Image (cartoon, helix red, strand yellow):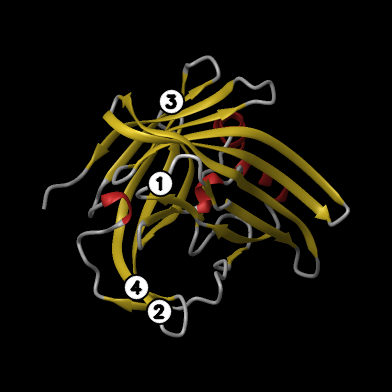
Amino acid sequence: MQFPSCFSLLLTQGLALTLSSTQAQDTSTLTHHALPVNNLTELAVAAPKSNQAFGMADNTELIYQIKDASGKPAGELRQRVVTLSSTERKESKKTIVPENITTLKSGLYTNKNLLVRLQDLTFRSRRDTCFTDGLADLDADALRRFRDRKLAYLPMPVAWPNQPTVGTSLPDGGINVQVSSSVVDIATVSTVLRKRRVVSGPSSLTTPAGTFNCYKVEAVRESATVPRPDMAMRTSVKQVDYYAPGVGIVRTEIYGKNGKVAQVRELAARNISAE
């Protein structure tokens, strides 16, 4: 999500793009297919009020401040819980585990409160791990040349263990987008976090939203456009996430090719409605 570069492009075109990890629609003809994970199945059951991803409740609101390389405000990301539900996930013939599902409406805004992009995200939690939606990591700027094409979104959930161990590796996560016309495949566009590793924590981190005990996760953020197997345009930069179990992502730093911080997204407010 390279927000500063996206702002000028989308505002010039007067476009507010709406994407969903369960159903994606804009001025193009879009389709979405959930990424299969070992052919696991889901069965709807009653929704509990607890054990949701990062302890979220109905109408929980997360507000992130976005800053550019010079530390100046570059926009705001607002996420609000829309629904809470629960499923049972079949991991093997004899193992079925409960899985809690949280859907959020996520909006990216400029400093002048103009909507740039709107997304529906799905967070999950099962066993001792929360999963954010890989769609949230999409580099929308990479899709600008394909606005009139058919797009199929295949998100890969990003795992955040509740009790991480420093020095351990975490699975890759992100999103692949298959671009096609009515008759032929055109390209695959992807943004994937690779080589994710818990490097330190927990340690205290203070943001406008408060002080949190966070783990530091470093990763390689790889953006790619692949028109055909023997041709690929790839860009790899460093990404650092600080997350607090029970709270979520507190701060994200995306670095440029020069090794310096290019963008920061920091939790400014976390509002949970009283019931």
Residue 249 lies, in percent from the top left, at 39, 40
| Residue drawn at (61%, 37%) of the image | 13
Residue flagged by tag 4: what amino acid is it? Thr
Residue flagged by tag 3: what amino acid is it? Asn
Is the residue under label 1 in contact with that under label 2 (CB below 8 Å)?
A: no
Sequence-first tag of 2 and 4:
4
| Distance (Cα) linking label 2 and label 3 | 48 Å
Sequence-first tag of 2 and 3:
2
Location of mark 2 (residue) = 95
Sequence-first tag of 2 and 1:
2
Classify mark 4: helix, strand or loop. strand
Location of mark 1 (residue) = 164
- Count of picture labels: 4
Location of mark 3 (residue) = 111
Residue 243 lies, in percent from the top left, at 39, 39
Residue 146 lies, in percent from the top left, at 71, 50
Sequence-first tag of 1 and 3:
3
Q: From this viewpoint, which residue is outermost toward the top?
A: 70
Is the residue under label 3 in contact with that under label 1 (CB below 8 Å)?
A: no
Location of mark 4 (residue) = 87
Residue flagged by tag 1: what amino acid is it? Pro
Which quadrant, please, contains the N terminus?
top right
